[in-house]
Amino acid sequence: MPPSLPGFSWPPRDTDRNRFLCRVQVVVYALVAAYFLVFALVSGAFVPWAIFTVAFAATLVVGVALLLMRAQRRATADPSVPLER
């Protein structure tokens, strides 16, 4: 396995703090994406579309991180039970 960067891991470690922060990020990024989507639809300008795209991508990335942390938690809870697909 190649060495990882110090202080950075993907998927994030499954801790209470990381789960809380990821949940807060999903809500904030989703609200920002929704706001700028409405703003972009009303104005038709490029900058709101760009901000919406970045916020939507960030929402998806953090959502995937939450799913990966859940998979880690299930895998460590009972190693004899295979993960559901």
Image (cartoon, helix red, strand yellow):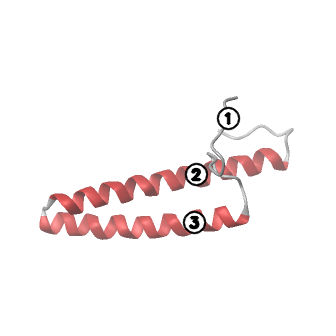
Q: Earlier in the sequence, mark 2 or mark 3?
A: 3
Q: Along the line of sight, which residue is nearer the eye, 81 or 67?
A: 67
- Is the residue marked by circle 3 packed among few (<14), some (14-19), or many (20+) residues within 10 Å? some
**Is residue 22 placed above or below 76 in the rendered structure?**
below
Q: Quadrant of residue 24?
A: bottom right
From the image, tell me which residue sits under label 2: 65
Task: Tell which residue pokes out farthest to the top in this image.
Answer: 1
Q: As shown in the figure, which amino acid type bears the numbered disc 1?
A: Pro
| Secondary structure state at the residue bearing disc 1 | loop
**Is residue 47 placed above or below 79 in the rendered structure?**
below
- Is the residue marked by circle 2 packed among few (<14), some (14-19), or many (20+) residues within 10 Å? many
Q: Residue at x 68, y 34 (%)?
A: 3
From the image, tell me which residue sits under label 1: 3
Label placed on residue 23: 3
Q: Along the line of sight, which residue is nearer the eye, 40 or 1?
A: 1
In percent of width and height, residue 14 lies at 71, 55
Instruction: Choose mark 1 or mark 2, whichever is in front.
Output: 1
**C-alpha gap between disc 3 and disc 1:** 28 Å
Q: Residue at x 63, y 43 (%)?
A: 5
Q: Earlier in the sequence, mark 1 or mark 2?
A: 1
Q: Along the line of sight, which residue is nearer the eye, 72 or 17?
A: 17
